[in-house]
Image (tube, rainbow, N blue to C red):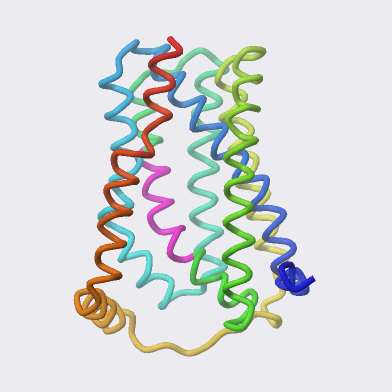
Amino acid sequence: METLRSFKHRNFRILFSANFVSNIGTWAQGVAQAWLILELTNSGSYLGIVTALQFLPTLFFSLSGGKIADKFNKRKVLMITNLTAGTSALSVATLVLTDHIKIWHVMFFAFMLGMGNAIDAPVRQSFNAEVVGKDDLPNAVGLNSANFNTGRLIGPGLSGILISLYGTGVSFLLNGISYFVVIAALISIRESELHIENHKRSSTKIREALRYVRARPDILAVMITVFFATSFGLNFNIFNTMMAT
């Protein structure tokens, strides 16, 4: 089928499956983290602070992630970012399951996860082009979007069940394991099948990209709209958790 043509690439099939597991784990942890914060503090302010600590690195370091994507081996960088995120999730899981968790632990590991994601996101998006090539990239982006949103549907529901049965620690454990599933998939990638192209120095590309955005009011308007939508419209997990307690 034309809509599934990216699956003809072995590397894409492997990563797609691993990312499906990881997406479920990520959304499961999101629910568990919010619930854990309220268990520890019963404070909406702390919930907002931890969320800010997790996502501020994306605001400040995503451009650096793009430079890293151009300069280093993307597959190896993704292994490091997933190792960082997986270790953070497993650390929180261990602290929760052993009843040693404190709010500062949650804040620290949320920030570490955010740092990993700030580098991971641009590198992963760039790596998709190497996995499927330019011709199949639009199709791969669509399939990955469906993958992400399917995880968004399954993860929170699964986390709710796990929290009701075992507490929040198991959701962190699930997410930690899911990152190592991605690492295993990255290890199994065949580099000989990647579509790797030579690029100019990343600093030049960033300047060119910023100039291009300034010269395109339509793109700038979309970016501003997305900024406000994600900043104020996608914090429903905070409100939902507060209303449920």
Main secondary-structure element of the magenta-colored stretch? helix
Q: Quadrant of the C terminus?
A: top left
Image x and y of residue 19, in percent? 64, 52
118 sits to left or right of 154: left
Left or right: 193 as drawn, with respect to 225: right
- Side (left or right) of 152 relative to 213: right
Range of the magenta residues? 111-123
Q: Residue furthest front?
A: 218
With respect to residue 128, does 159 lie above or below?
above
Snapshot quadrant of residue 97: top right
Task: Please say whether residue 114 is one of the residues in the magenta stretch.
Answer: yes
In the rendering, at what x and y percent does residue 165 appear? 67, 12
User: In the image, residue 232 lies at what x, y percent?
Assistant: 29, 39
Tell me the residue at 30%/14% (across/down): 43
Q: Residue at left 42%, top 43%?
A: 113
Residue 76 picture location, percent across and down: 55, 66
Q: Residue 99 versus residue 9: which sits nearer the camera? A: 9
- Is 203 above or below relative to 110? below
- In which quarter of the view is residue 51 placed? top left
Residue drawn at x 57%, y 22% is: 169
What count of labels does the image hold? 0
Q: Residue at x 50, y 45 (%)?
A: 85
Report the quarter where the N terminus lies.
bottom right
